[in-house]
Image: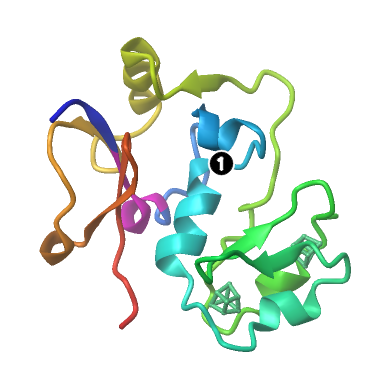
Amino acid sequence: MGKKLLIDLISLRDLENLPADAVLKQDKYSSSFKTIRELATFQFTCRHCENAPCIQVCPAKALDKDENGLISRAVNLCIRCKSCITACPFGTMMDNLFIVKTSGQRFFSLANENDLEDFARFFPDQVVSIVDRDENPEENIYRLSDMILIKEKIWQ
Ligand code: SF4
Ligand code: SF4
């Protein structure tokens, strides 16, 4: 099965100051430099509104839906005004979701086992852990990518 990161978005929200909002690099993600948290939030926490208020309110036209109906942010257009965070009726986006840490930010490779362990070490065990398992919706655990599982309560 192979090692994966299990990131618990439910517990993550309880952390006031994230110890590492680091970017995990994988081919699919490296061009966008979005955090795993942003990708997971739009895939699993977002309620995928039909006429999405977040898209409507964005003054920079940085938000759109991708081919799967998921909200996607163009990081080059986003001016981090937080209008979308305010407009979302469901509190989907945390206040610091789009903060980019530049100085000293470390990038971790999903292909490197040592990097995965280093990344997990930044967080309490209940938030990020290394597991050898697959997704199981009955436990609120879903697959984000080959290397990442996300725990989240999904709106039905
Ligand atoms: S922070 Fe502002 S510019 Fe960025 S996506 Fe949200 S509304 Fe658009
Ligand atoms: S308004 Fe909130 S819940 Fe609706 S699509 Fe945008 S981020 Fe998702």
Tell me, yes or no, whether the highlighted magenta stretch contains residue 9: yes
Query: Residue at position x 69%, y 57% from top?
Result: 73
Ligand 2 - quadrant of the structure image: bottom right
Give the left or right position of residue 13, taking residue 134 as reference.
right
Visual colour scheme: rainbow
- Residue 153 or 62: which is nearer the viewer? 62
Give the left or right position of residue 110, taking residue 21 as reference.
left
Which image quarter is the C terminus in?
A: bottom left
**Secondary structure beneath disc 1?**
loop
Please, is residue 41 above or below residue 19 in the view?
A: below
Query: Residue at position x 36%, y 32% from top?
Result: 123
Give the left or right position of residue 11, taking residue 45 as reference.
left
Name the amino acid type tagged 1: Thr
Task: Tell me if I can see residue 84 in this picture.
Answer: yes
Disc 1 target residue = 35
List x then y, in percent, for residue 83. Answer: 77, 71
Which image quarter is the N terminus in?
A: top left
What is the span of residues highlighted in magenta in the rendered image? 6-12
Query: Residue at position x 81%, y 55% from top?
Result: 78
Q: Splitting the image into 4 quarters, where does residue 50 fall?
A: bottom right
Task: Tell which residue pokes out farthest to the bottom in this image.
Answer: 51
List x then y, in percent, for residue 154. Answer: 32, 72
Task: Tell me if I can see residue 23 in this picture.
Answer: no
Q: Splitting the image into 4 quarters, where does residue 93 fall?
A: bottom right
